[in-house]
Amino acid sequence: MKVTILGCGGSAGVPMIGGADGSGDWGDCDPKEPRNRRSRSSIVVEGTDNKRLLVDASPDLRNQIIDCRITGIDAVLFTHAHADHISGIDDIRILNRIANRPLEAFATPRTLEEISRRFAYAFKPWDPPHFFRPVLVGAPVEPGDTLETAGLTVQLFNQNHGRIDTLGLRIGAFGYSTDVVRLDEPAMAALAGVDTWVVDCFLRGEAHWTHANLNYVLAWVDRLRPRRTVLTHMGTGMDWGWMAANLPAGVEAAYDGMVLTV
């Protein structure tokens, strides 16, 4: 199984809009380090049959798909309906053209309801043979479900993200936990024995009410003991150089375009 990190930044990306000269607000991140430049968080999971599952559609989807040389997508899963995870939906129309069919969109009923309200045109029935808009077919799922899609067996679990919940994923030995601040016992059970875990780590020491910080992640790692932990959804406080020098063995920062083999 191959996992491509399309983007690993927080909701505003790195750098954020702004900066003294308008070239971007890098915060603590060194602008000379290319791995500090982060688009919004999303991944593609590819199984042994070369089918691919897109997890979330960030506002940067077009550039991500091109930069990572992704030739097509077979299905989409949305972890939740925040803008940085769904605003790339319009670019799915080209993925429809490549597949020559509508694409299933897996999400909880609450997430599907919100996405279909904001992007109603994307969920209208397809009028063959053209794709002048994205065409998605909503497929409701719940935490605890196991679904078969894109040649993958995907186990879903619930995560707390402040005021809302998000979906976490377990696919074989791989786990994905974007946008999470608390993991309950069913989530920890779903992640038990995971080999490679990509997990939200928005900032270092200070607490955040919707995202994990490094202290949270290291406590989870101490319990789960994955062989490899990869940090994602990182903000401007997460400098690549600092992390390379200070993260413990087995824990590392993601970067846009990173490929994991699980």
Image (cartoon, rainbow, N blue to C red):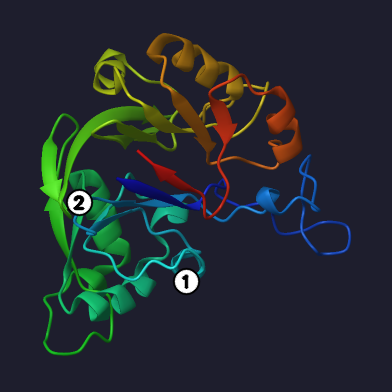
Q: Is residue 258 above or below residue 159?
A: below
Which residue sits at x=34%, y=28%? 159
Kindly report which numbered mark, 2 or 1, lies closer to the viewer in this rendering.
1
Which residue sits at x=58%, y=31%? 252
Which residue sits at x=38%, y=58%? 86
Report if residue 239 is visible in the image: no
Q: Quadrant of the N terminus?
A: top left
On the image, the x and y values in percent for residue 250 come to 53, 23
Q: Which mark, residue 66?
A: 1
In this view, the residue in front, 36 or 19, is 36
Q: Which mark, residue 106?
A: 2
Q: Which mark, residue 200?
A: none
Badge 1 element: helix
Q: Quadrant of the C terminus?
A: top left
Report if residue 168 is visible in the image: yes
Q: Is residue 176 above or below residue 91?
A: above
Most extreme residue toward the right is 20
On the image, the x and y values in percent for residue 217 come to 51, 21
N-terminal label among 2 and 1: 1
On the image, the x and y values in percent for residue 148 come to 11, 46
When asked about the image quadrant of residue 242, the answer is top right
Judge from the rendering whether residue 123 lies leftward or rightward of residue 63; answer left or right. left
On the image, the x and y values in percent for residue 196 come to 39, 30
Judge from the rendering whether residue 259 lies leftward or rightward of residue 20; answer left or right. left
Amino acid at circle 2: Phe
Amino acid at circle 1: Ile
Give the Cα distance between marks 2 and 1: 23 Å
In this view, the residue in front, 192 or 1, is 1
At label 1, counting other C-alpha atoms closer than 10 Å, the crowd grade (few under 14, some 14-19, many 20 or more) is: few
Q: Are marks 2 and 1 in contact (CB under 8 Å)?
A: no
